[in-house]
Amino acid sequence: MVAQSKLAGGVALSVIALALAIREKGQKDAESACSLNSQYTPEKKKGQDKKVAINNDFLERFMRLFRIIVPGLWTPEVAYALLVAGLLTARTTFDITILHMMTSIERAIGSRKDFVHHLSRFLLVMLPVSVVNCLLKYGQTELSLRFRTRLSTYLYTKYLHEYTYYKVSNLDTRITNPDQLLTVDVERFATSVADLYSNVTKPLLDISIYAYKLAGTIGLSGPTTMLSYLVGSGVFLTWLRQPTGRFTIAEQRLEGNYRFVNARLITHSEEIAFYHGNKREHAILQSSYDALVHLIRQAQQFRFSISVVDNIIAKVYHNVPVMTPNGDVLVPSLSFKVLSYCSLRDQILYPNTADDSTDDADLLGLLQLVQLEYLADGTSEILLLFYHAPQFAILDECTSAVSVDVEGLMYSYCKKQNITLFTVSHRQSLWKYHDYVLQFDGRGAYSFREIQQSDMALGS
């Protein structure tokens, strides 16, 4: 007996140590994935990544909505909630009754006595069980529908009051999708609240009824031990599963990145085709997909490992769902930032890759040719032009952010490289680098002529 106790204690310690190691590895992998800022992911500023939690702010907002869907004690919503609770109690009672009946049937099969009697009892109880299950489903659906009706009525009253709908659509940009909020989101919220009520009530009723039945059979120490183990193992398993949420966040982020690079390929298909960027875009898509697959495999390995520990620890009582509330903060405060999906070096080399034999010193030399060691806005296009040296280039206000002398160095270098330039600009100082001018008068007329020496004396 002592040896068995020591063996059981050793196994328990081994399981706990294994669980801690699995959680530690999962936590590191999840945090690494969440902090990943690839060339497709904008790096968040400190304070922007607001963590979602059941705090005072969450409870306050939930109670404001709850007072709308359940405005008082003597309401149909409370009546249906009590009906659902009663039906849940009846179903648990029937479960216990059926368990006793199945035991009696098994004994009757072994002893070959009263088998028909016990089987008849089992068949008779199936009718009320079926009725209870159907009524329970109906009550949950009706409760959800009444919650939705209350909230929709309240929101439409506010939405259609004194041209609020016009202000939301045309004057206030904080809400960009009122149609979805008033339809899909309201339905999901009502269904979630009804499901939350059932998922919380059912385990509490099950625990109370089973504890009462056990206390009457084996005394109070039995249910006390069981409930203590249940609470302790539940808290421990919830703590073990914490990295799952981080994995989910990282997975959704990489899924968004993967969708973005596919959408980007469609949006910029003309430019990519012009630069023959097929191979580079294929590498970008493959890199995004590989990162997503790697993360999904890590998440699946963690979930598999935790499920093994879960089945060991929660084997005594496995009917308590562990719920993680989904309260994703979409846009707490909107800020706008223009980013690039890759570095300046990648933009200059495109569609070539960083693996190509191009030294940073060569790129720096291109900058120094035109005194652009420190870039101004819009001059990355000039570097792209210098590096690829095409036969011709169309430049649209590309020198508006640089001085006239630097502008001259740029155009002089292009002429030395025999690059034919088509320039769109308001600066007449650029005429001396061109042979012809197409000029619009702003009233529908235009003129196309050769640039004369006298035109260059007019300045900028």
Image (cartoon, rainbow, N blue to C red):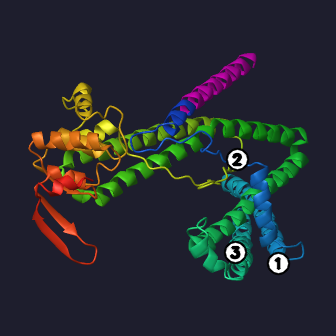
Q: CA distance from mark 1 to mark 2?
A: 31 Å
Query: Which image quadrant for residue 286?
Result: top left
Q: Secondary structure at mark 2?
A: loop
Q: Earlier in the sequence, mark 3 or mark 2?
A: 2
Q: Which residue is mark 2?
A: 53
Query: Which image quadrant for residue 99?
Result: bottom right
What amino acid is found at the position of numbered circle 2 in the picture?
Answer: Ala
Q: CA distance from mark 3 to mark 1?
A: 13 Å
What amino acid is found at the position of numbered circle 1 in the picture?
Answer: Pro
Q: Secondary structure at mark 3?
A: helix
Q: Which residue is mark 1?
A: 76
Discs 3/2, front: 2
Residue 388 in picture, x, y percent from top left: 17, 41
The main secondary structure of the magenta stretch is helix
Of 228 and 114, nearer the camera is: 228
Q: Secondary structure at mark 1?
A: helix
Question: Do we see residue 201 in this rendering?
Answer: no
User: Is disc 3 surrounded by few (<14), some (14 to 19) or many (20+) residues within 10 Å?
Assistant: many
Query: Which image quadrant for residue 15?
Result: top right
Stretch of the chain drawn in magenta: 1-26
Question: Do we see residue 387 in this rendering?
Answer: yes
Q: Residue at x 23, y 51 (%)?
A: 429
Quarter of the image with the N terminus is top right
Q: Earlier in the sequence, mark 3 or mark 1?
A: 1
Q: Is residue 237 above or below residue 141?
A: above
